Amino acid sequence: MNADLIFSAANYLAMLGWLILVLHYIARETLSFLKKPVEQAWIPVLLSILYTIVMGLTLAGILPGSEGSFSSIVGVRSLFESDYALLAGWVHYLAFDLFVGTQIMKAARAHGVSVLILLPIWFFTFMFGPVGYLLWRILRPLVLKADNEVAA
């Protein structure tokens, strides 16, 4: 099992997931076949399965691991000295960021939020996870308030 190859595959899978998410939001009527995979977060599930396999094999000693702990920054740094532990950490980010992007999409769709507002939020969620989520939480009341005023 080559860590670099798995890393590349996970990155491509995550990018595909983000592309499908955006395309589905823009053209959900035309691309209705994407509804189930997007809304049920199939790609984050696949990434989560990959994470579970890599972590399981690392913890079982089948893949090389490293010593360390979560009790200090030095311990965490030590954990990520293994390529496979680092890979698992990266896949963890990819899965959760895409899952958060999917949840943002669901909330945005329920209120008819423009894709032009979502694109920068999704970009920051993809690149900087919590920053994108924070941006969504800050903008959401403004966007939803504007939607309600238009409807009223």
Image (spheres, grey):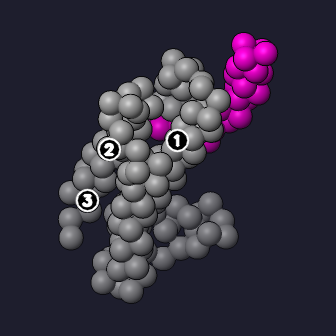
Q: From the top left corner, tell me how far across and down residue 71 is, in percent.
A: 67, 70
Say which residue label 1 marks: 101
x 31%, y 78%: residue? 63
Vertical comparison of 61 with 24: above or below: below
Q: From the top left corner, tell me how far across and down residue 151 is, in percent.
A: 73, 17
Q: From the top left corner, tell me how far across and down residue 58 is, in percent.
A: 38, 78
Vertical comparison of 138 with 77: above or below: above
Q: Earlier in the sequence, mark 1 or mark 2?
A: 2
Is residue 90 in view from this perspective?
Answer: no
x 72%, y 25%: residue? 144
- Looking at the rendered structure, the secondary structure element under dot 3 is helix
**Alpha-carbon neighbours of circle 3 within 10 Å: few (<14), some, or many (≥20)?**
some
Contact (Cβ within 8 Å) of mark 3 with mark 2: no
Say which residue label 3 marks: 6
Dividing the picture into quarters, in which one does residue 114 lie?
top right
Say which residue label 2 marks: 33
**Marks 3 and 2, how far apart at CA:** 28 Å
Q: Quadrant of the C terminus?
A: top right
Q: Is residue 141 magenta?
A: yes
The prevailing secondary structure element of the residues shown in magenta is helix
x 62%, y 35%: residue? 110
x 40%, y 51%: residue? 36
Q: Amino acid at mark 3?
A: Ile
